[in-house]
Amino acid sequence: MGFFKNLFIKEDRRTDLEKIDPEKIPKHIAIIMDGNGRWAKKRSLPRSAGHKAGVEALREVIKTCSNLNVQYLTLYAFSTENWKRPEEEVSALMNLLVYYLRNEIQELNENNVRINTLGDINKLPNTALIEIEAAQKLTRNNTGLTVNIALNYGGRLEIINAVKSICIKVINKEIEVDQIDERYFSDHLYTKNVPDPDLVIRPSGELRISNFLLWQIAYSEFWFSKIFWPDFNGEYLVEAILDYQGRDRRYGGAK
Ligand code: FPP
C-alpha cells in the first residue's frame, strides 16, 4: 500500500513531475506495450522473459497513472492477430495475465483501481476468464483509475461487431437509420462510456497503430519512443504527459 504511493520518479527527475499541470492531466491514456521480444533478444533471453519484464513496466505505469489521477488507462495486451504467435508464447502470455491478476488484484483494489477488459474475451482460456471475472467483480465499484486490458482485441473487428448489432436493431425497427450518429455508434463499441484516448503511447520505435482503437483515436495525440516496453517507467510517462501538455489540440478547428 505504502509502495503504491511512490510516484516512481527518481529524485533528480522530480522537477519534471513538478512541471506537470494538474489541470491538464490526460483523462485517458492508451498504450501499445511493444518491444518485449526485442528486449529479450538483446539479452539472449526467451521472448516470454520479455513479456514478464513488460509486466513490471505495466505495474509501474498503473501506479503512476493512479497517483497522477489519470482516469482511464487502456493497455493493448493481446490482439486478435496475436493468436498467430507460437503456442508456447500465447500460453506464456495467458499465464502471465492469470499470475498478474491473481497477485496484484488485492493491492489494486485497495488503491481504488477498477479492472475492465476490451475485446472478445470469451476466446481466452478458462483460467484467464476466471481471474478476469473475479477482478472485475471485486473492483466494479471502485472510482479511481480504470484499467482497460485489451485482450483478443482488434479495432476492425470491434467496428464490424458494432455495425452488425446496429443493423439488427434497424431490421427489428428499434431505430431509424437517421438516428445513427457518432454518439450512437460509439455506444456499440467495447469502450461504451469511456472517453476517447487523449494520449496514445507506443514505445519500441514502431510508428503504426496496429489495429488499436481505430475509431476512438480520431483526435488522440501520439507519443512514440524508441525504448522497448520493459524499459518504460514512470519517468517516461511523465515525459509523455509533459509533451502532451505542450500540444495545441484544435479538433479540426482554427487557431
Ligand atoms: C508486444 O511486444 C507485446 C505483446 C504482444 C504483449 C504485451 C503483454 C504484456 C506486457 C504482459 C501481459 C499483460 C498483462 C495485462 C498482464 P512484442 O512481443 O511484439 O515485441 P517485439 O515486437 O519486440 O517482438
Image (cartoon, rainbow, N blue to C red):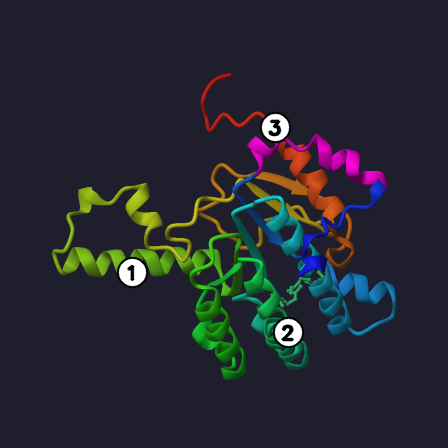
Question: In the rendering, at what x and y percent does residue 157 appear?
Answer: 42, 61
Label 3: which residue?
A: 247
Nearer to me, 88 or 247 = 247
Nearer to me, 225 or 63 = 63
Q: Label 1 amino acid? A: Lys
Q: Label 3 amino acid? A: Arg
Secondary structure under tag 3 reads loop
Q: Which mark is residue 164?
A: 1
Spatial CA span between label 1 and label 2 = 38 Å
Q: Residues within 10 Å of mark 3 (few under 14, many from 20)?
A: few
Secondary structure under tag 2 reads helix
> Of discs 1 and 2, which sits in the foreground?
2
Image quadrant of ligand 1 equals bottom right
Secondary structure under tag 1 reads helix
217 versus 52 height, above or below: above
Label 2: which residue?
A: 103
Q: Quadrant of residue 248?
A: top right
Residue 34 visible = no
Q: Residues within 10 Å of mark 1 (few under 14, many from 20)?
A: few
Question: In the rendering, at what x and y percent does residue 172 appear?
Answer: 13, 60
Q: Are marks 3 and 2 in contact (CB under 8 Å)?
A: no
In-image side of 158 versus 188 (left or right) = right
Q: Label 2 amino acid? A: Asn
Q: Which residue is pictured at 64% across the width and 27% down the height?
A: 246
Q: Which residue is pictured at 78% across the width and 55% down the height?
A: 231
Spatial CA span between label 1 and label 3 = 37 Å
Point out the stretch of residues depicted in magenta.
12-25
250 versus 8 height, above or below: above
